[in-house]
Image (cartoon, coloured by chain):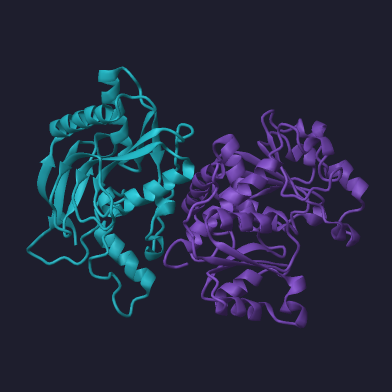
C-alpha cells in the first residue's frame, strides 16, 4: 500500500535557511571551530553534513573535516530483516580521539539509528564530545536520546513517514509528510523512502506496526513482501 | 543467499555485491579496534576434514571481527575417527544450535550434501576438485582492488587446472565478471575441451602469458606427478614454472597471484614471492574481508 504526500513541511528556501541557522548554532555552542568535525550518517546525513560545512566555511572561513558513517553493522534489527541492507563504507578523516563530533542525520525518530551511530563512533576512537544534529525531529523515541540541534520539530503519528528529499540524492530539496491514503486502511506504514533507496524513515523502522508475517508463509517470504510494500 | 556452495552460476550482480560488501568490511580491518557487533550471538561451525591454514584461520578471524563465535572441529580429534559420517556430524552440529557450517572436504559435493539436509547455511571452504568459492571471491577482490576492474582483463592460470578447485572457482568468477581466461599447464592436467565456460587453453605457457594482466600460478601437488600426469618436478619447473623472465612476457603492469601454500622453486621462482607484482600477501589479507562479507550476507538476516 503506497503512501501519499500529505504536507510539505519545508521547501528548498526553508531548508537552506534552516541549515544555515543550524550551522551558526553548531559553531556558537562549540565556541568556534577548534577540533570540530561533522560526521554524516548514511545516507542523507552525508550531504546535510557537507552543506553545514559549506555554511560554516562561508561565515567562519574554516573548512570543517567531514566523515561519513555507515551504521548497518551496528543495527539492532539485522536478525529481523530478510534482506540484507547493503553495507557501505565508513570514512573518517583521521583519529576521532579528542575531537568534538557533530553527528548529522536527516530524521530523528525512534533513536535507534543514533544509538547505532554512537556505538560505531565509540569503536573508532574516544571523542571529547558527541552532539547530534537532525533536520527533522518527529518524536516517538524508543531510547533515551535527544538531539542538540534540530531543524524543525514535527509532531507526527506513527502511521506517517517523514521523507527528506535532497538535491544531491533526489534531485530537489523538500521535506514531506507522507501518510496512508485514508480511503483504504494500510498495514505497514513505518517504512519510508522511495524504491531503491532508503531514507531514515525507512531505516528506523518502528516495531509498533502489525507483524508482517502472514500465517502459512515462511518468515523470509513474509518479510520480503512487507519490505516491498513499505518501500 | 542461504548457502555459498560454488561460484558457478552466481549472477554478476551478486558477485559484485559480495565484493562491494567485502570492501566495506576491509575498512573495519584497518581500525584500531577491529570488531563490530553485527553477528553477536551467532555461532559458526568450522568443519575441516582436510588441512588448512589460511582458509580456516581467516574464517575464524572473520567470525571474531563480526562478533560471532566459531567452533572448530578438525577430523583428527572428533568422532569422525569413530566412523561418524559427514551428515551425522552436520546434524550433531545443528542440534548443538550452530547458525552456519563452513566445510572443507576431500570429496567434491560434500557441502552440497550438507546443504540439502541441514536447515542452517552452508559455506563451501573447498570440496575435492570441485570449487573453493571464497578463494575465488578473494582472488576477484584482490585483482579488482589493484586494477580497479575485472572486465576486459586477461587472466592466465598456470598449473594443474584439472584438479584445482581454486582454478575452477576463479574461472567461473572471472569469466562471469567479463575477464578473458586462458589456461596453461601440462596437457594431461588441462580440463577437457568443450566445457560450458568459454576459456582458452594454451599449453605453451610463454604464449599463454603473452599480454596477460593477471598471472595466477597454482600449487603443484606431488601426488599428481607420481600418478604420471607430468614427467618430473624439474621438467615442470622448466616448462611451466613462473620466473622473472617468463613474467616479463605478460603486460608490464601484470600482477602475480598464488593461492598458497607455494612450492617455492617449482611453480614460482622464490624471488617472485615478494616482488612488486606479487599480490600473494594481499590475497591472504583479502581473505578475511571476503569471508566477513560472506558471513554477513549468509547469517545477517532472517534466513541465517
Which x, y percent locates residue A81?
A: 37, 63
Farthest left residue? Answer: A183
Residue B257 vs residue B227, the one in the foreground: B257
Above or below for B149 versus B72: above
Residue in view at x 35 percent, y 39 percent: A130
Residue A40 vs residue A145, the one in the foreground: A145
Q: Quadrant of residue B78?
A: bottom right
Residue A173 in view in this figure: yes
B52 on left or right of B40: right
Residue in view at x 41 percent, y 57 percent: A84
Which x, y percent locates residue B99?
A: 52, 69
Residue B197 in view in this figure: no
Residue B255 vs residue B20, the one in the foreground: B20
Chain whose colour in the figure is purple: B
Chain whose colour in the figure is cyan: A
Q: Tell me the quadrant of the picture where the C terminus of chain A can be found.
A: bottom left
Residue B187 vs residue A99, the one in the foreground: A99
Amino acid at each position: 500500500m503506497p503512501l501519499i504526500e500529505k504536507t510539505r513541511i519545508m521547501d528548498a528556501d526553508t531548508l537552506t535557511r534552516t541549515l544555515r541557522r543550524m550551522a551558526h548554532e553548531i559553531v556558537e555552542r562549540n565556541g568556534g571551530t577548534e577540533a570540530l568535525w561533522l560526521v554524516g550518517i548514511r545516507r542523507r546525513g552525508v550531504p546535510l553534513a557537507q552543506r553545514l560545512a559549506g555554511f560554516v566555511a562561508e561565515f567562519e572561513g574554516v573548512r570543517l573535516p567531514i566523515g561519513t558513517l555507515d551504521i548497518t553493522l551496528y543495527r539492532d534489527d539485522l536478525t529481523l530483516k530478510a534482506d540484507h541492507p547493503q553495507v557501505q563504507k565508513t570514512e573518517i578523516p583521521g583519529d576521532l580521539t579528542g575531537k568534538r563530533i557533530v553527528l548529522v542525520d536527516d530524521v530523528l525518530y525512534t533513536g535507534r539509528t543514533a544509538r547505532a551511530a554512537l556505538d560505531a563512533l565509540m569503536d573508532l576512537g574516544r571523542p571529547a564530545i558527541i552532539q547530534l544534529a537532525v533536520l527533522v525531529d518527529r518524536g516517538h523515541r524508543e531510547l533515551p536520546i535527544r538531539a542538540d540541534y534540530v531543524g524543525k520539530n514535527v509532531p507526527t503519528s506513527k502511521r506517517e513517514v517523514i521523507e527528506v528529499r535532497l538535491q544531491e540524492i533526489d534531485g530537489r530539496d523538500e521535506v514531506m509528510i507522507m501518510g496512508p491514503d485514508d480511503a483504504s486502511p494500510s498495514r505497514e506504514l513505518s517504512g519510508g523512502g522511495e524504491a531503491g533507496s532508503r531514507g531514515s524513515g525507512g531505516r528506523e523502522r518502528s516495531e509498533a506496526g502489525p507483524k508482517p508475517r502472514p500465517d502459512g508463509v515462511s518468515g523470509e517470504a513474509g518479510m520480503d513482501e512487507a519490505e516491498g510494500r513499505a518501500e | 543467499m542461504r548457502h555459498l556452495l560454488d561460484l558457478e552460476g552466481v549472477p554478476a550482480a551478486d558477485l559484485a555485491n559480495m565484493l562491494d560488501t567485502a570492501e566495506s568490511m576491509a575498512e573495519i580491518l584497518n581500525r584500531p579496534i577491529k570488531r563490530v557487533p553485527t553477528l553477536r550471538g551467532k555461532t559458526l561451525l568450522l568443519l575441516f576434514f582436510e588441512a588448512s591454514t589460511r582458509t580456516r584461520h581467516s574464517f575464524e578471524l572473520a567470525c571474531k571481527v563480526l562478533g560471532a563465535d566459531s567452533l572448530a572441529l578438525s577430523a583428527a580429534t572428533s568422532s569422525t575417527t569413530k566412523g561418524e559420517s559427514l551428515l551425522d556430524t552436520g546434524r550433531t552440529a545443528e542440534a548443538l544450535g550452530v547458525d552456519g557450517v563452513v566445510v572443507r572436504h576431500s570429496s567434491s559435493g560434500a557441502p552440497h550434501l550438507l546443504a540439502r539436509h541441514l536447515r542452517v547455511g552452508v559455506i563451501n571452504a573447498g570440496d575435492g576438485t570441485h570449487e573453493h568459492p571464497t578463494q575465488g571471491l578473494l582472488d576477484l577482490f584482490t585483482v579488482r582492488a589493484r586494477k580497479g576492474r575485472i572486465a576486459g582483463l586477461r587472466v592466465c592460470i598456470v598449473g594443474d587446472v584439472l584438479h584445482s578447485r581454486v582454478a575452477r572457482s576463479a574461472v567461473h568468477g572471472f569469466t562471469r565478471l567479463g575477464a578473458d581466461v586462458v589456461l596453461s599447464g601440462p596437457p594431461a592436467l588441462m580440463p577437457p575441451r568443450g566445457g560450458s565456460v568459454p576459456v582458452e587453453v594454451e599449453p605453451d605457457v610463454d604464449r599463454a602469458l603473452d599480454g596477460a594482466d593477471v598471472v595466477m600460478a597454482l600449487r603443484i601437488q606431488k601426488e599428481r606427478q607420481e600418478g604420471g600426469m607430468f614427467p618430473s618436478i624439474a621438467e615442470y619447473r622448466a616448462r611451466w614454472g613462473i620466473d622473472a623472465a617468463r613474467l616479463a612476457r605478460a603486460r608490464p603492469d601484470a600482477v602475480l597471484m598464488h593461492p598458497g601454500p607455494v612450492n617455492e622453486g617449482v611453480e614460482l621462482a622464490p624471488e617472485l614471492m615478494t616482488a612488486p607484482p606479487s599480490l600473494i600477501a594481499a590475497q591472504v589479507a583479502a581473505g578475511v574481508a571476503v569471508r566477513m562479507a560472506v558471513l554477513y550476507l549468509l547469517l545477517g538476516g532472517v534466513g541465517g
